[in-house]
Image (cartoon, grey):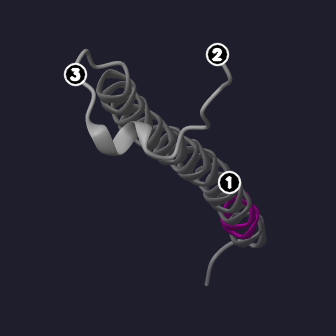
């Protein structure tokens, strides 16, 4: 029906296409995994930055309340009395 060289050429072309498709799939997988990994790193850094910001604001508020001008009687009740 078909010439033997034509059948061989179609078979060779088919093998080349299958090989190229495997190469494209492997490259796409590597690119996808790299992007996924960088996304996870970014999310972790963002969460850490948020927690650090919350702690910084909490520290600032506690510092300002501890350094306030007004003191109350309950604050000095537990202090040790020094001689003199």
Q: Earlier in the sequence, mark 3 or mark 2?
A: 3
Q: Residue, x 33% and y 45% (percent of image)?
A: 74
Q: Secondary structure at mark 3?
A: loop
Question: Going by the image, does 15 lie left or right of 70?
Answer: right
Circle 3: is it few (<14), some (14-19), or many (20+) Cα within 10 Å? Answer: few
Residue linked to disc 2: 84
> Would you identify the image quadrant in which residue 51 lies?
top left
In the image, which is nearer the foreground, mark 3 or mark 2? 2
On whether residue 13 falls in the magenta region, the answer is: yes
Q: Earlier in the sequence, mark 3 or mark 1?
A: 1
Q: Secondary structure at mark 2?
A: loop
Give the CA distance from mark 1 to mark 2.
91 Å
Which one is nearer the viewer's eye here, 4 or 16? 16
Marker count (numbered): 3
Q: Residue, x 68% and y 54% (percent of image)?
A: 20
Q: Secondary structure at mark 1?
A: helix
Circle 1: is it few (<14), some (14-19), or many (20+) Cα within 10 Å? Answer: few
> Would you identify the image quadrant in which residue 84 lies?
top right
Q: Residue furthest left?
A: 70
User: Where is 78 relative to 58, above or below?
Assistant: below
Q: Which residues are magenta?
A: 10-16
Kindly identify which numbered label has been placed on residue 70. Answer: 3
Question: Going by the image, does 56 lie left or right of 21?
Answer: left
Kindly identify which numbered label has been placed on residue 20. Answer: 1
Q: Main secondary structure of the magenta part?
A: helix
């Amino acid at each position: 029906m078909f010439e033997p060289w034509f059948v061989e050429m179609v078979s060779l072309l088919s093998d080349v296409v299958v090989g190229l498709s495997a190469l494209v799939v492997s490259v796409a997988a590597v690119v996808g995994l790299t992007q996924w990994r960088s996304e996870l790193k970014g999310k972790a850094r963002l969460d850490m930055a948020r927690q650090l910001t919350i702690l910084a604001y909490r520290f600032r508020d506690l510092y300002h309340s501890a350094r306030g001008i007004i003191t109350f009687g309950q604050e000095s009740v537990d202090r040790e009395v020094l001689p003199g």
